[in-house]
Image: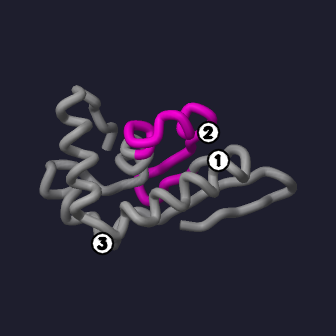
Amino acid sequence: MNLHDFDGEHSLTMYAGGLAADAAVVAAGYEPNGYFWEGLMRFAWPDVAERLDFDSEAGMFCATGSLGDLTRLKTVVESVITSPAAVADILARAETSGFEFDD
């Protein structure tokens, strides 16, 4: 995950695919693309996600917003994308709640 600053505009990007947690995503029946990761972040951290703008694509997750919100999101997400068990836990909670991912 990378934080960017372009003329005072802050963004957080992450290339989809090749992540440690991809196997858990595929096992749950989803495509581990930018849209999926956006949905996971919207579900797992709605308080931060509601203050961000998203522009994800199939191959990349992208969010723009305040540096503080993006830094917070980066910190929590980095520990999740390296842990298939953490992703599986979030997916189980999302399924129980009826949340639908756009992948």
Which residue lies under the disc numbered 2? 52
Which residue lies under the disc numbered 3? 20
| Side of 57 relative to 88 (left or right) | right
**Mark 1 or mark 2, whichever is nearer to me:** 1
Q: For the magenta stretch, what is the residue range?
A: 41-62
Identify which residue is drawn at 28% across, 47% down: 90
Identify which residue is drawn at 35% across, 47% down: 36
| Side of 53 relative to 59 (left or right) | right
Using the image, determine if residue 30 lies above or below residue 46: below
Quarter of the figure with residue 25: bottom left
Q: Nearer the viewer, residue 96 or 22?
A: 96
Check contact, mark 1 vs mark 2: CB within 8 A.
yes
Sequence-earlier tag: 3 or 1: 3
| Residue 54 magenta-highlighted | yes
Identify which residue is drawn at 22% across, 61% down: 85
| Residue 69 magenta-highlighted | no
* On-image quarter of the C terminus: top left
